[in-house]
Image: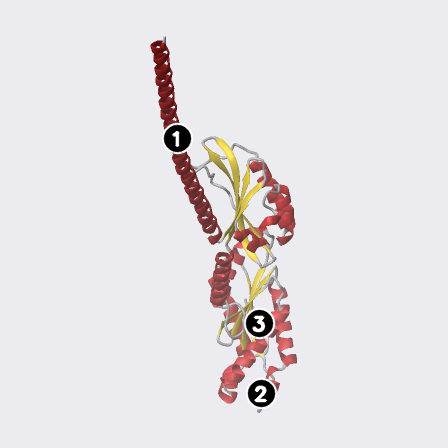
Amino acid sequence: MREHSTVLVVIALAAAAAFAFAWALGATRARARARTEREDLGAALEASEAVSAALSEEALFLSAVLSAVDTAIIIFDRDGRVRFVNVRFSAFFGVPTVEVVGRSLETLHARIAPCFVDVDAFGRHAALEDRRRVSDGEPARLSGLPIADETELIVARPKRRVLRWSTRPVLQGTLRVGVLTLFRDVTAERDAEDARERLLDELSAQARTDALTSLANRRAASAALGTEIDRARRYGRPLSVVEFDLDHFKDVNDRHGHDAGDKVLVAFADVLRATARATDVVARWGGEEFLAIVFEADAEAARVFAERVRTELRARSPLSSVPGARGPLTVSAGVASLGPADDADSLLRRADRALYAAKAGGRDRTTLAA
């Protein structure tokens, strides 16, 4: 009996030892698993933090890049709310980014509209952009950005700028995920173009204008005469030319110098310009010779015009301001009206012959061509 009890005790102790060993082994394995899980979790957290840091760094880098370009960039989500604006937006429109981020497209348009010189033009284009924003029909490049038309508008505040505005949908495949709006600053480009156009206009004007009198020069007058002869033929309207030559002009230069001669030429140009109609062409033909192309005027009407010029020149008496000058400044004129057989050369030759007839007849007079 005592032996049987001893066996049971031994069996119980063995079972307890086995259970304790199994429990200890399980606890060891659990601790190992927990340690492994903690290590895996720590590694995952470190990786997540690294990814987050990388994403944050990438976002900061992209934001810096987008803010460095000379373009105001606005990104809307698919619901039309502002998700991002770069610093150029505030520089262009004087509107803090915090006032528009998270707001609707309509709110953004209302904030920047007063900045534009032509608010109505801005409103019309904004309405067009609203329609484009909800349209899926625009062709897109492989990048997902369509080839967009640009509208040029001017902002006056906080600083004058010329901006080109375009809106482009942002696509992922065929899914529209947002809208990109760009305001590109082209002020320097436009100013350079304007300066170039002004220079070309000035050069063109210089090529057509007499430097001393600011009247048309011979080249410009010759071109105008050819054009007006064609017009007169086409519509059956009269056309005349008047050649003027200042009397004894060489004596003015010889006696009083070229400065006095230049003043006389300018004074006569002023008389010619003031007497002519806006539709007439008056030009310095060369030296002291001048030409007037008188529209819608027959020979008699052109003669009356020439006589007004001659009379006005006497009345102004430009030589009176020249010390030692003797007698009034006078002019002779020859008038020719366009005939059926005339071209520009023959018409001018006839006027030239009439002018020399006036000179031969005693000067200070107007003569009609035969």
Q: Secondary structure at mark 1?
A: helix
Q: CA distance from mark 2 to mark 1?
A: 120 Å
Q: CA distance from mark 3 to mark 2?
A: 29 Å
Locate residue 158: give its quadrant: bottom right
Q: Mark 2 or 1 closer to N-term?
A: 1
Q: CA distance from mark 3 to mark 1?
A: 128 Å
Q: Quadrant of the N terminus?
A: top left
Q: Nearer the viewer, mark 2 or mark 1?
A: 1
In this rendering, the answer to whether 254 lies above or below 179 is: below
Query: Horizontally, is 209 left or right of 33 in the view?
Result: right
- Say what amino acid the circle numbered 2 marks: Val
The answer to whether residue 1 is seen in the rendering is: yes
Name the residue tied to disc 1. Answer: 31
The spot of residue 366 in percent (x, y) is 59, 73
Q: Nearer the viewer, mark 3 or mark 1?
A: 1
Is the residue under label 2 in contact with that under label 3 (CB below 8 Å)? no
Q: Quadrant of the C terminus?
A: bottom right
Q: Which mark is residue 367?
A: 3
Residue positioned 63% across, 71% down in the render: 274
